[in-house]
Amino acid sequence: MIEPERIAPLNSREIVRGDYVLYWMQQSQRARWNHALEYAVARANKLGQPLLVCFGLTEAFPEANLRHYTFMLEGLREVGLALHRRGIAFTVQRGDPAEVALRLGRRASLIVCDRGYLALQKAWRQQLAGSARCAVVQVESDVVVPVNAASHKAEFAARTLRPKLRRLWPKYLREVRTVPVMSPGLSRVPPGLDWRNPEAILRRLRIDSRNRSELIARFRPPRNISRGGTSEAEKVFRRFCCRLLRTYKEHRNQPQTCSVSHMSKYLHFGQVSPLWLALEVRKHSEAGRINIDSYIDELLVRRELSINWVEFTPHYERYDALPRWARETLAKHARDRRPHLYSRAQLEAAETHDPYWNAAMNEMRYTGYMHNHMRMYWGKKILEWSPTPEEAHATALALNNKYFIDGRDPNSFANVAWIFGLHDRPWPERPIFGKVRYMNARGLERKCDIAAYLKRVERLMAKSP
Protein backbone atom coordinates (compact mmCIF):
# COMPACT_ATOMS: atom_id res chain seq x y z
CA MET A 1 0.00 0.00 0.00
CA ILE A 2 1.28 3.47 -0.93
CA GLU A 3 0.84 6.04 1.81
CA PRO A 4 -1.85 8.60 0.86
CA GLU A 5 0.51 11.48 1.68
CA ARG A 6 2.62 10.51 -1.32
CA ILE A 7 -0.31 10.89 -3.73
CA ALA A 8 -1.59 14.26 -4.98
CA PRO A 9 -4.07 15.00 -7.80
CA LEU A 10 -2.63 17.84 -9.91
CA ASN A 11 -5.90 18.76 -11.62
CA SER A 12 -9.63 18.25 -11.15
CA ARG A 13 -10.24 16.21 -14.29
CA GLU A 14 -11.61 12.66 -14.34
CA ILE A 15 -10.29 9.40 -15.70
CA VAL A 16 -11.44 9.20 -19.32
CA ARG A 17 -11.81 6.47 -21.93
CA GLY A 18 -8.36 5.85 -23.38
CA ASP A 19 -6.01 3.18 -24.67
CA TYR A 20 -3.63 2.96 -21.71
CA VAL A 21 -2.47 4.49 -18.44
CA LEU A 22 0.57 6.71 -18.94
CA TYR A 23 3.36 7.06 -16.40
CA TRP A 24 5.54 10.03 -17.26
CA MET A 25 8.85 9.16 -15.61
CA GLN A 26 11.06 12.15 -14.95
CA GLN A 27 12.56 12.36 -11.45
CA SER A 28 12.29 8.70 -10.33
CA GLN A 29 14.33 7.07 -13.10
CA ARG A 30 14.17 3.49 -11.88
CA ALA A 31 12.04 0.39 -12.25
CA ARG A 32 12.45 -0.81 -8.65
CA TRP A 33 11.29 0.75 -5.38
CA ASN A 34 9.32 3.37 -7.28
CA HIS A 35 6.00 4.37 -5.71
CA ALA A 36 4.87 6.22 -8.84
CA LEU A 37 5.47 3.22 -11.08
CA GLU A 38 3.71 0.78 -8.76
CA TYR A 39 0.78 3.17 -8.35
CA ALA A 40 0.50 3.41 -12.14
CA VAL A 41 0.59 -0.40 -12.50
CA ALA A 42 -2.19 -0.75 -9.91
CA ARG A 43 -4.38 1.84 -11.64
CA ALA A 44 -3.80 0.23 -15.05
CA ASN A 45 -4.75 -3.16 -13.58
CA LYS A 46 -7.95 -1.71 -12.15
CA LEU A 47 -8.88 -0.22 -15.51
CA GLY A 48 -7.95 -3.41 -17.36
CA GLN A 49 -5.51 -1.46 -19.52
CA PRO A 50 -1.82 -1.69 -20.38
CA LEU A 51 0.70 0.73 -18.93
CA LEU A 52 2.96 2.92 -21.03
CA VAL A 53 5.98 4.55 -19.40
CA CYS A 54 7.51 7.53 -21.19
CA PHE A 55 10.54 9.72 -20.67
CA GLY A 56 10.97 13.10 -22.36
CA LEU A 57 14.59 13.81 -23.27
CA THR A 58 15.24 17.53 -23.59
CA GLU A 59 18.50 18.98 -24.84
CA ALA A 60 17.68 22.25 -23.08
CA PHE A 61 17.95 21.21 -19.43
CA PRO A 62 19.85 24.09 -17.78
CA GLU A 63 23.60 23.47 -17.39
CA ALA A 64 23.41 19.80 -18.40
CA ASN A 65 26.25 18.44 -20.53
CA LEU A 66 27.45 15.12 -21.94
CA ARG A 67 28.68 14.00 -18.53
CA HIS A 68 25.14 14.22 -17.17
CA TYR A 69 23.40 12.84 -20.26
CA THR A 70 25.70 9.82 -20.45
CA PHE A 71 25.10 8.84 -16.84
CA MET A 72 21.35 9.35 -17.20
CA LEU A 73 21.02 7.39 -20.44
CA GLU A 74 22.92 4.46 -18.97
CA GLY A 75 20.28 4.39 -16.25
CA LEU A 76 17.37 4.70 -18.69
CA ARG A 77 18.64 1.75 -20.67
CA GLU A 78 18.36 -0.38 -17.55
CA VAL A 79 14.90 1.03 -16.85
CA GLY A 80 13.72 -0.01 -20.30
CA LEU A 81 15.06 -3.53 -19.99
CA ALA A 82 13.54 -3.98 -16.52
CA LEU A 83 10.14 -2.71 -17.65
CA HIS A 84 10.24 -4.95 -20.70
CA ARG A 85 10.73 -7.97 -18.45
CA ARG A 86 7.57 -6.95 -16.54
CA GLY A 87 5.54 -6.57 -19.73
CA ILE A 88 5.46 -2.77 -19.51
CA ALA A 89 6.04 -0.64 -22.61
CA PHE A 90 8.71 2.07 -22.44
CA THR A 91 9.50 4.90 -24.82
CA VAL A 92 12.05 7.72 -24.74
CA GLN A 93 10.85 10.69 -26.77
CA ARG A 94 12.95 13.64 -27.79
CA GLY A 95 11.47 16.99 -26.78
CA ASP A 96 10.29 19.10 -23.88
CA PRO A 97 9.30 16.58 -21.17
CA ALA A 98 5.90 18.13 -20.45
CA GLU A 99 5.07 18.30 -24.15
CA VAL A 100 6.09 14.66 -24.60
CA ALA A 101 3.76 13.66 -21.74
CA LEU A 102 0.95 15.79 -23.19
CA ARG A 103 1.36 14.26 -26.64
CA LEU A 104 1.29 10.70 -25.37
CA GLY A 105 -1.38 11.64 -22.84
CA ARG A 106 -3.92 12.30 -25.60
CA ARG A 107 -4.56 8.55 -25.76
CA ALA A 108 -4.30 7.97 -22.01
CA SER A 109 -7.12 7.32 -19.56
CA LEU A 110 -4.98 8.59 -16.69
CA ILE A 111 -1.55 10.21 -16.42
CA VAL A 112 0.70 9.46 -13.44
CA CYS A 113 3.89 11.42 -12.76
CA ASP A 114 6.55 11.42 -10.06
CA ARG A 115 7.50 14.50 -8.02
CA GLY A 116 10.43 16.85 -8.58
CA TYR A 117 11.32 19.80 -6.39
CA LEU A 118 13.19 22.20 -8.68
CA ALA A 119 11.34 25.14 -10.21
CA LEU A 120 11.62 23.74 -13.74
CA GLN A 121 10.27 20.37 -12.65
CA LYS A 122 7.30 22.04 -10.96
CA ALA A 123 6.63 24.13 -14.07
CA TRP A 124 6.59 21.01 -16.25
CA ARG A 125 4.01 19.36 -14.00
CA GLN A 126 1.86 22.46 -13.89
CA GLN A 127 1.94 22.64 -17.68
CA LEU A 128 0.93 18.99 -17.96
CA ALA A 129 -1.84 19.24 -15.36
CA GLY A 130 -3.27 22.37 -16.91
CA SER A 131 -3.41 21.06 -20.48
CA ALA A 132 -4.06 17.31 -20.13
CA ARG A 133 -7.53 16.07 -21.07
CA CYS A 134 -7.57 13.52 -18.24
CA ALA A 135 -6.69 13.32 -14.55
CA VAL A 136 -3.02 13.82 -13.65
CA VAL A 137 -1.83 12.29 -10.36
CA GLN A 138 1.58 12.95 -8.80
CA VAL A 139 3.21 10.28 -6.62
CA GLU A 140 6.22 11.21 -4.49
CA SER A 141 8.97 8.61 -4.38
CA ASP A 142 12.37 10.27 -3.96
CA VAL A 143 12.21 11.04 -0.25
CA VAL A 144 11.48 8.76 2.68
CA VAL A 145 9.11 11.17 4.43
CA PRO A 146 6.89 13.11 1.99
CA VAL A 147 8.01 16.72 2.04
CA ASN A 148 4.68 18.20 3.07
CA ALA A 149 4.13 15.54 5.72
CA ALA A 150 7.45 16.45 7.33
CA SER A 151 6.96 20.22 7.47
CA HIS A 152 4.97 23.07 5.96
CA LYS A 153 7.78 25.63 6.05
CA ALA A 154 11.48 26.06 5.34
CA GLU A 155 13.26 24.64 8.38
CA PHE A 156 15.99 26.63 10.09
CA ALA A 157 18.50 23.78 10.33
CA ALA A 158 18.90 20.02 10.61
CA ARG A 159 18.24 20.23 14.34
CA THR A 160 14.73 21.57 13.72
CA LEU A 161 13.80 19.10 10.98
CA ARG A 162 15.41 16.00 12.51
CA PRO A 163 12.86 15.36 15.30
CA LYS A 164 9.97 15.82 12.87
CA LEU A 165 11.43 13.25 10.49
CA ARG A 166 12.34 10.78 13.22
CA ARG A 167 8.76 10.71 14.50
CA LEU A 168 7.55 9.76 11.02
CA TRP A 169 10.17 7.19 10.03
CA PRO A 170 8.25 4.20 11.46
CA LYS A 171 5.33 5.07 9.19
CA TYR A 172 7.30 5.55 5.97
CA LEU A 173 10.35 3.28 6.25
CA ARG A 174 8.59 0.42 4.47
CA GLU A 175 9.39 -1.70 1.46
CA VAL A 176 7.76 -0.73 -1.84
CA ARG A 177 5.73 -3.72 -2.99
CA THR A 178 6.04 -4.72 -6.65
CA VAL A 179 2.56 -4.89 -8.16
CA PRO A 180 2.02 -7.75 -10.67
CA VAL A 181 1.13 -6.53 -14.16
CA MET A 182 -2.30 -7.98 -14.93
CA SER A 183 -3.14 -6.36 -18.25
CA PRO A 184 -1.37 -7.24 -21.50
CA GLY A 185 1.45 -5.01 -22.67
CA LEU A 186 0.91 -2.34 -25.27
CA SER A 187 0.95 -3.97 -28.71
CA ARG A 188 2.30 -0.91 -30.52
CA VAL A 189 4.78 1.25 -28.62
CA PRO A 190 5.01 4.84 -29.88
CA PRO A 191 8.27 5.21 -31.82
CA GLY A 192 11.03 7.10 -30.11
CA LEU A 193 14.75 7.09 -29.48
CA ASP A 194 16.58 3.77 -29.21
CA TRP A 195 17.00 3.69 -25.45
CA ARG A 196 18.90 0.40 -25.78
CA ASN A 197 21.76 2.32 -27.42
CA PRO A 198 22.81 5.32 -25.28
CA GLU A 199 25.82 6.00 -27.49
CA ALA A 200 23.61 6.45 -30.55
CA ILE A 201 21.41 8.91 -28.67
CA LEU A 202 24.43 10.87 -27.44
CA ARG A 203 25.71 11.23 -31.00
CA ARG A 204 22.39 12.78 -32.03
CA LEU A 205 22.05 15.24 -29.16
CA ARG A 206 22.58 18.88 -30.07
CA ILE A 207 24.04 19.97 -26.76
CA ASP A 208 26.90 22.14 -28.03
CA SER A 209 27.90 21.75 -31.64
CA ARG A 210 30.59 24.45 -31.35
CA ASN A 211 33.17 22.24 -29.71
CA ARG A 212 31.75 18.78 -29.43
CA SER A 213 35.05 16.90 -29.30
CA GLU A 214 36.18 18.93 -26.30
CA LEU A 215 32.87 18.31 -24.56
CA ILE A 216 33.15 14.57 -25.09
CA ALA A 217 36.66 14.54 -23.65
CA ARG A 218 35.88 16.77 -20.68
CA PHE A 219 32.39 15.69 -19.70
CA ARG A 220 32.14 11.97 -20.38
CA PRO A 221 31.91 10.27 -16.96
CA PRO A 222 35.26 8.60 -16.24
CA ARG A 223 35.13 4.88 -15.76
CA ASN A 224 37.15 4.99 -12.55
CA ILE A 225 34.00 6.10 -10.74
CA SER A 226 31.02 4.07 -11.95
CA ARG A 227 28.29 3.77 -14.54
CA GLY A 228 24.72 4.94 -14.26
CA GLY A 229 21.81 2.67 -13.43
CA THR A 230 20.01 1.04 -10.51
CA SER A 231 21.97 -2.21 -10.60
CA GLU A 232 25.26 -0.33 -10.57
CA ALA A 233 24.04 1.84 -7.68
CA GLU A 234 23.06 -1.23 -5.66
CA LYS A 235 26.38 -2.93 -6.38
CA VAL A 236 28.36 0.14 -5.32
CA PHE A 237 26.27 0.56 -2.18
CA ARG A 238 26.56 -3.07 -1.08
CA ARG A 239 30.32 -2.84 -1.54
CA PHE A 240 30.31 0.28 0.65
CA CYS A 241 28.27 -1.47 3.34
CA CYS A 242 30.57 -4.49 3.40
CA ARG A 243 33.91 -2.68 3.24
CA LEU A 244 33.55 0.89 4.49
CA LEU A 245 30.45 1.26 6.65
CA ARG A 246 32.15 0.03 9.82
CA THR A 247 34.44 3.09 9.76
CA TYR A 248 31.96 5.58 8.29
CA LYS A 249 31.55 7.80 11.35
CA GLU A 250 35.32 8.01 11.81
CA HIS A 251 36.25 8.47 8.14
CA ARG A 252 33.37 10.32 6.49
CA ASN A 253 35.17 13.66 6.90
CA GLN A 254 38.53 12.22 5.83
CA PRO A 255 38.88 12.97 2.09
CA GLN A 256 42.00 10.86 1.69
CA THR A 257 40.04 7.69 2.53
CA CYS A 258 37.01 8.37 0.31
CA SER A 259 35.03 6.13 2.68
CA VAL A 260 31.71 7.29 1.30
CA SER A 261 28.84 5.57 -0.50
CA HIS A 262 28.95 7.54 -3.79
CA MET A 263 25.14 7.49 -3.85
CA SER A 264 24.55 11.20 -4.43
CA LYS A 265 24.71 10.98 -8.23
CA TYR A 266 22.35 7.99 -8.29
CA LEU A 267 19.94 9.80 -5.98
CA HIS A 268 20.13 12.89 -8.17
CA PHE A 269 18.82 10.98 -11.20
CA GLY A 270 16.40 8.92 -9.14
CA GLN A 271 18.26 5.75 -10.11
CA VAL A 272 18.18 4.47 -6.53
CA SER A 273 15.55 4.87 -3.84
CA PRO A 274 16.59 6.55 -0.56
CA LEU A 275 14.12 4.19 1.09
CA TRP A 276 16.00 1.16 -0.25
CA LEU A 277 19.30 2.64 0.91
CA ALA A 278 17.98 3.24 4.44
CA LEU A 279 16.56 -0.26 4.81
CA GLU A 280 19.60 -1.88 3.21
CA VAL A 281 22.12 -0.13 5.45
CA ARG A 282 20.18 -1.27 8.53
CA LYS A 283 20.80 -4.88 7.57
CA HIS A 284 24.52 -4.47 8.28
CA SER A 285 24.33 -4.45 12.06
CA GLU A 286 27.92 -5.72 12.28
CA ALA A 287 29.05 -2.22 11.20
CA GLY A 288 27.83 -0.79 14.50
CA ARG A 289 24.92 1.44 15.42
CA ILE A 290 27.01 4.62 15.46
CA ASN A 291 28.01 4.20 11.80
CA ILE A 292 24.55 3.22 10.61
CA ASP A 293 22.95 6.14 12.46
CA SER A 294 25.54 8.54 11.05
CA TYR A 295 24.85 7.40 7.51
CA ILE A 296 21.08 7.53 7.93
CA ASP A 297 21.34 11.07 9.31
CA GLU A 298 23.17 12.17 6.16
CA LEU A 299 20.72 10.35 3.90
CA LEU A 300 17.40 11.03 5.62
CA VAL A 301 17.97 14.32 7.43
CA ARG A 302 20.61 16.35 5.60
CA ARG A 303 19.34 15.40 2.16
CA GLU A 304 15.69 15.97 3.01
CA LEU A 305 16.61 19.28 4.67
CA SER A 306 17.98 20.42 1.29
CA ILE A 307 14.78 19.34 -0.43
CA ASN A 308 12.74 21.14 2.23
CA TRP A 309 14.68 24.35 1.56
CA VAL A 310 14.22 24.17 -2.21
CA GLU A 311 10.53 23.29 -1.85
CA PHE A 312 9.70 26.24 0.40
CA THR A 313 12.17 28.87 -0.84
CA PRO A 314 11.24 30.90 -3.91
CA HIS A 315 14.20 31.59 -6.20
CA TYR A 316 16.46 29.30 -4.18
CA GLU A 317 19.16 29.74 -6.84
CA ARG A 318 19.58 33.44 -6.11
CA TYR A 319 21.95 35.13 -3.71
CA ASP A 320 19.06 36.99 -2.09
CA ALA A 321 17.55 33.65 -0.97
CA LEU A 322 20.33 33.40 1.65
CA PRO A 323 19.49 34.16 5.29
CA ARG A 324 19.23 37.89 6.00
CA TRP A 325 21.84 37.80 8.76
CA ALA A 326 24.35 36.22 6.37
CA ARG A 327 23.73 38.75 3.58
CA GLU A 328 23.99 41.62 6.03
CA THR A 329 27.30 40.50 7.53
CA LEU A 330 28.80 39.72 4.11
CA ALA A 331 27.68 43.12 2.82
CA LYS A 332 29.36 44.78 5.79
CA HIS A 333 32.66 43.15 4.78
CA ALA A 334 32.22 43.30 1.01
CA ARG A 335 34.96 45.96 0.68
CA ASP A 336 37.47 44.10 2.84
CA ARG A 337 40.81 43.47 1.16
CA ARG A 338 41.06 39.99 -0.35
CA PRO A 339 44.44 38.25 0.00
CA HIS A 340 43.98 36.76 -3.49
CA LEU A 341 41.57 37.43 -6.35
CA TYR A 342 40.87 34.89 -9.10
CA SER A 343 38.60 35.00 -12.13
CA ARG A 344 36.09 32.24 -12.77
CA ALA A 345 38.30 30.99 -15.63
CA GLN A 346 41.32 30.73 -13.32
CA LEU A 347 39.28 28.87 -10.72
CA GLU A 348 37.83 26.51 -13.30
CA ALA A 349 41.33 25.70 -14.55
CA ALA A 350 42.53 25.04 -10.96
CA GLU A 351 45.12 27.80 -11.29
CA THR A 352 45.38 29.13 -7.74
CA HIS A 353 48.24 29.34 -5.25
CA ASP A 354 46.57 26.71 -3.02
CA PRO A 355 47.47 23.07 -3.85
CA TYR A 356 44.66 21.73 -1.64
CA TRP A 357 42.04 23.80 -3.43
CA ASN A 358 43.48 22.94 -6.84
CA ALA A 359 43.31 19.24 -6.00
CA ALA A 360 39.66 19.55 -4.99
CA MET A 361 38.83 21.38 -8.21
CA ASN A 362 40.65 18.74 -10.25
CA GLU A 363 38.85 15.93 -8.46
CA MET A 364 35.58 17.55 -9.56
CA ARG A 365 36.75 18.22 -13.12
CA TYR A 366 38.17 14.77 -13.74
CA THR A 367 35.68 12.58 -11.88
CA GLY A 368 32.42 14.50 -11.51
CA TYR A 369 32.74 14.11 -7.74
CA MET A 370 34.41 15.85 -4.82
CA HIS A 371 34.59 14.62 -1.26
CA ASN A 372 32.08 16.59 0.82
CA HIS A 373 34.67 17.87 3.30
CA MET A 374 36.66 19.32 0.42
CA ARG A 375 33.47 20.76 -1.09
CA MET A 376 33.11 22.91 2.02
CA TYR A 377 36.71 24.13 1.83
CA TRP A 378 36.41 24.63 -1.94
CA GLY A 379 33.36 26.84 -1.55
CA LYS A 380 34.70 28.87 1.36
CA LYS A 381 37.80 29.77 -0.62
CA ILE A 382 35.75 30.89 -3.61
CA LEU A 383 34.02 33.31 -1.22
CA GLU A 384 37.40 34.50 0.07
CA TRP A 385 38.98 34.92 -3.39
CA SER A 386 36.11 36.60 -5.25
CA PRO A 387 35.61 40.40 -5.55
CA THR A 388 32.13 40.24 -4.01
CA PRO A 389 30.06 37.61 -2.18
CA GLU A 390 27.44 37.82 -4.96
CA GLU A 391 30.04 36.94 -7.59
CA ALA A 392 31.37 34.15 -5.36
CA HIS A 393 27.89 32.64 -5.06
CA ALA A 394 27.37 32.73 -8.83
CA THR A 395 30.79 31.18 -9.48
CA ALA A 396 30.40 28.39 -6.93
CA LEU A 397 26.97 27.45 -8.25
CA ALA A 398 28.05 27.54 -11.89
CA LEU A 399 31.10 25.32 -11.33
CA ASN A 400 29.13 22.99 -9.07
CA ASN A 401 26.38 22.48 -11.63
CA LYS A 402 28.73 22.16 -14.58
CA TYR A 403 31.10 19.52 -13.26
CA PHE A 404 29.36 17.46 -10.58
CA ILE A 405 27.34 14.52 -11.88
CA ASP A 406 24.93 15.29 -9.03
CA GLY A 407 24.88 19.02 -9.83
CA ARG A 408 21.63 20.92 -10.50
CA ASP A 409 20.09 19.21 -7.48
CA PRO A 410 18.41 20.42 -4.26
CA ASN A 411 21.56 19.33 -2.45
CA SER A 412 23.68 21.42 -4.83
CA PHE A 413 21.68 24.59 -4.27
CA ALA A 414 21.55 24.06 -0.51
CA ASN A 415 25.23 23.08 -0.21
CA VAL A 416 26.36 26.17 -2.09
CA ALA A 417 24.04 28.31 0.01
CA TRP A 418 25.54 26.70 3.16
CA ILE A 419 28.90 28.19 2.20
CA PHE A 420 27.26 31.60 2.66
CA GLY A 421 25.44 30.81 5.93
CA LEU A 422 22.36 28.72 5.13
CA HIS A 423 21.42 26.17 7.82
CA ASP A 424 24.27 27.50 9.96
CA ARG A 425 24.64 30.04 12.79
CA PRO A 426 26.66 33.24 13.17
CA TRP A 427 30.30 32.73 14.17
CA PRO A 428 32.87 35.17 15.61
CA GLU A 429 33.32 38.06 13.19
CA ARG A 430 36.35 38.22 10.93
CA PRO A 431 37.41 39.98 7.71
CA ILE A 432 35.64 39.11 4.42
CA PHE A 433 33.43 36.43 6.02
CA GLY A 434 31.91 38.58 8.72
CA LYS A 435 29.96 36.15 10.91
CA VAL A 436 29.77 33.41 8.25
CA ARG A 437 31.73 30.26 9.07
CA TYR A 438 35.39 30.32 7.98
CA MET A 439 37.69 27.48 6.89
CA ASN A 440 41.42 27.51 6.24
CA ALA A 441 44.22 25.22 5.11
CA ARG A 442 45.51 24.72 8.63
CA GLY A 443 42.17 23.18 9.54
CA LEU A 444 42.57 20.63 6.76
CA GLU A 445 46.12 19.82 7.87
CA ARG A 446 44.94 19.39 11.45
CA LYS A 447 41.84 17.30 10.77
CA CYS A 448 42.83 15.02 7.90
CA ASP A 449 45.80 13.62 5.97
CA ILE A 450 45.71 16.25 3.26
CA ALA A 451 48.96 15.07 1.69
CA ALA A 452 47.39 11.65 1.12
CA TYR A 453 44.39 13.37 -0.46
CA LEU A 454 46.66 15.16 -2.94
CA LYS A 455 48.20 11.85 -3.95
CA ARG A 456 44.77 10.25 -4.36
CA VAL A 457 43.66 13.01 -6.71
CA GLU A 458 46.87 12.68 -8.73
CA ARG A 459 46.13 8.98 -9.23
CA LEU A 460 42.56 9.75 -10.31
CA MET A 461 43.77 12.30 -12.83
CA ALA A 462 46.26 9.83 -14.24
CA LYS A 463 43.47 7.30 -14.84
CA SER A 464 41.15 9.75 -16.58
CA PRO A 465 41.15 10.32 -20.34
Image: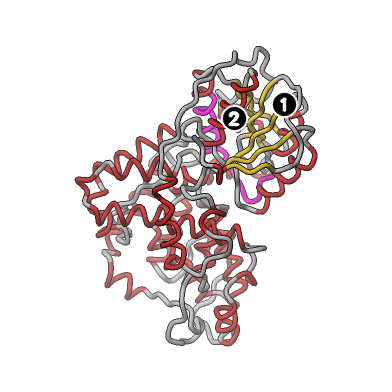
The disc placed on residue 40 is 2
| Residue bearing mark 1 | 109
Task: Tell me the amino acid under the disc marked 2.
Answer: Ala
Image position, residue 416 (x, y; %): 52, 64
Residue 335 in the image: above or below residue 234: below
Q: Quadrant of the C terminus?
A: top left
Q: Position of residue 463 (x, y in %)?
A: 37, 43
Which element type, helix, strand or loop, lies under badge 1?
Answer: strand
In the picture, measured across the screen, residue 195 lies left or right of residue 232, that is: right
**Place of residue 455 in the rendered image (x, y in percent of width and height, measured from the top left):** 30, 56
Q: Report the disc number at residue 193.
A: none
User: For the magenta stretch, what is the residue range?
Assistant: 60-80
Type of secondary structure dominating the magenta stretch? helix
State left or right for residue 230 relative to residue 417: left
Whether the magenta-drawn stretch holds residue 66 is answered as: yes
Residue drawn at (25%, 60%) of the image: 250
Q: Residues within 10 Å of mark 1 (few under 14, many from 20)?
A: many
Name the residue at 65% across, 36% down: 57
Q: Name the amino acid, label 1.
A: Ser
| Relative side of 103 to 348, left or right | right
